Amino acid sequence: MQPEILTGSEQVCIPNISPVEQRKRLISGVLGLIMGTALLAVLSSTGAVRTWRLALFPLWVGATVGYFQAREKT
């Protein structure tokens, strides 16, 4: 029996975070998305200056990173 040889198109993903940490990242990602969307709705409805909406960008980036870390198990 010979060992399997992987070609360039095959990838092996070994999770490096536990299921508990995956769940934490998923929850933080979803909550960040919900909070960012709610804050955007508040800022839009109150007529706040557009530059204040830019402050939501780091929140959405953090939520996206948390979601994709949970999804990819990294």
Image (tube, rainbow, N blue to C red):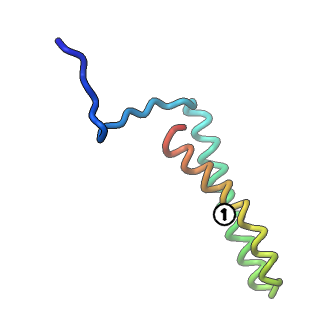
At label 1, the amino acid type is Ile
In the picture shown, does residue 54 fall above or below 71? below
In the picture shown, does residue 69 fall above or below 34? above
Q: Is residue 9 left or right of residue 49?
A: left
Q: Residue furthest left?
A: 1
Q: Position of residue 30 (x, y in %)?
A: 62, 56
Q: What SS does tag 1 mark? A: helix
Q: Nearer the viewer, residue 31 or 69?
A: 69
Give the quadrant of residue 9. Answer: top left
The residue lying at 77 percent from left, 78 percent from top is 42
Q: Quadrant of the N terminus?
A: top left
The residue lying at 72 percent from left, 75 percent from top is 40
Q: Position of residue 68 (x, y in %)?
A: 54, 49
Q: Position of residue 50 (x, y in %)?
A: 77, 82
* Residue to which mark 1 is pinned: 34
Circle 1 crowding by C-alpha within 10 Å: few under 14, some 14–19, many from 20: some
Q: Is residue 71 left or right of residue 59?
A: left
Give the quadrant of residue 55. Answer: bottom right
Q: Quadrant of the C terminus?
A: top right
Q: Is residue 72 left or right of residue 32?
A: left
In the picture shown, does residue 17 fall above or below 40? above
In the picture shown, does residue 18 fall above or below 39? above
Q: Nearer the viewer, residue 56 or 3?
A: 3
